[in-house]
Amino acid sequence: MGTRTKKAATNLAFVVPSQVIICILDFYLKRKFASALGVMSMGIESTFSNLLTLFSLSGLGILPALSYNLYKPFAENDTERLKIVVDFIKKVCWGLAAFFLLIGGLFVFRLEWVATNIYDIKNMKIIYLLFLINAVLPCFFAHRHSMILYNQKKYIVVIINFIAVSLSAVAKLFILNTNPNLVSFMACTVLATLLEGVIVFFVSCRKYPFLATKSDACISKREALVSFKNVGGAVLNHVFGLVVNFTNNIYMSKFVGLAVAGIYSPYQAILSEVKLFNSHFCEAIGPSVGNLAALGEYKKLEKRFYSVLLIGNWIFSMAACVLASNLTPFINVWMPGNTTFDDTTCMFILINFYMLAIRKLVLMFKNNMGIYWDGRYVTFCEAVLDVILGYLFSGHGAIGIFAGLTISVICTCFWWEPWLLFKLGFKSSVVVYFKKQLLYYGASVSCCVISVLFCSQITAPGWARVRVGCIISMIVQIFVFWIAFRKTEEFLSLRQLVFEFFRFHVFKLFKLKNRR
């Protein structure tokens, strides 16, 4: 097993269990949150979270575009160059933090633009400011975070995040059980973000002591221009992507009603957990992609892409299959009394979720290969189309808004971004990708249909219905994908990779035991 593959596999080994535990904690917290603070507060929390993504480095894609310059120095073990790049990232991020605080602070006087009756909730301005601080805080630790992440040590960041989130969850549960209020709840989130940043700072100081001494040199004008061009492309892509999310939430709040935004909030909470896993999954293997790209090994990268595509489709097809059969029963048990959407609306929600999850995999390769500027028109066209279609279809309620998103994605990102990746990155034909991906979509639809038919026969009530439904859905999905793809080159190479990974770690454990 190669060093890059070993590091990516180790990162994933930490990501999966930690995210499962955090997901369970988050679901329990969301349930307590809804019962203690109500649907209106959930709608506000969802709306502010989406709005303030505009004032975060990761939300705008700035940090990955800047940190792309770390790949080559890490590949060549050039510590002097690393110091120069990190100092450049620090200056840019701190400058942006001041800008975000200034612009975001101005919104506090016009919160009624976000949703109607927003001031019905007490201390709304304080709540908004806490959301803003929580969005901006990571900017001050971003350069240290990038050093750990882009050195293919995602597992360290995962452990630190797990500690901060777990402590925050305990504090939030205490608040919700004793004196439930949104101000204290958000204060815990802010403190957890601060704690995570401080731990990242001290860990990076210990792992990279050479950063303590500042380099006399600075990044060249040409490199700075290339970096800012990448940042410009990343910001345009992410801003238009955020316009899509923000527009859908605003249409929901304004034209359908804040109560419907509250109904959508549990769906969003469930899907955001899976999307968060997708982000961690991409961060775990992304640096190895960037490392290969820095060394110019494009043929190897293309082969790795198809393996990752199979893993991604297997994981997110399973998620879609489980949700298709169990989403409404789960929400009914998780949040009793909460209104749910009809089956057709849920179908559009899951179609959008699956397509965007696979899109994230394509973007992960595209961005880690430094293809930012060339994709600036993709999300612009998607945003324009979504804004128009969402407005036209909003008269049909939530289903119209979700259908507008589905059409806009199919007409733009679905084909455009893979074409850019293969043309500018792999420098090969995209036809093979579309053939494989259409097969994955077909298999996933089959899984969902079979799973829904089986689960509709379950008569068990409450949590028993959800547990049985989830087990059936997972068995169906695994069986269908195994039958369909077990003889493919990607499946065989992945099977070998998993075998080598476990053999390596078992051997390591036995070695440690013998030493003792």
Image (cartoon, helix red, strand yellow):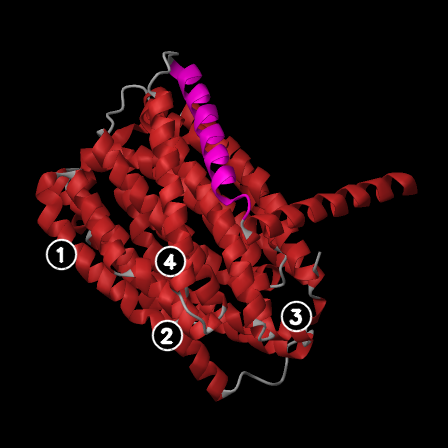
Determine whether 61 is above or below 444 in the image. Answer: below
**In percent of the image, x 51 and y 48: which residue is there?**
311
Where does label 2 land, which residue? 373
Please name the amino acid that badge 4 sits on.
Phe
> Cβ–Cβ below 8 Å for labels 3 and 4?
no
Span highlighted in magenta in the image: 462-487
Q: Which residue is mark 4?
A: 434
Picture quadrant of residue 79: bottom right
Q: Which mark is residue 388?
A: 1
Looking at the rendered structure, which numbered label has been put on residue 211? 3
Amino acid at circle 2: Trp
Are the residues tagged 3 and 2 within 8 Å (C-beta)?
A: no
Q: Secondary structure at mark 4?
A: helix
Q: Is residue 399 visible?
A: yes
Label 4 or label 1, whichever lies nearer to me, is 4
Q: Position of residue 409 (x, y in %)?
A: 27, 55
Q: Secondary structure at mark 2?
A: helix
The secondary element bearing badge 3 is classed as helix
Tell me the mark number nearer the camera, choosing from 1 and 3: 1
First in sequence, mark 1 or 3: give its number: 3
Disc 2 + disc 1, Cβ < 8 Å: no
Mark 3 nearby-residue class (10 Å; few <14, some 14–19, many ≥20): some
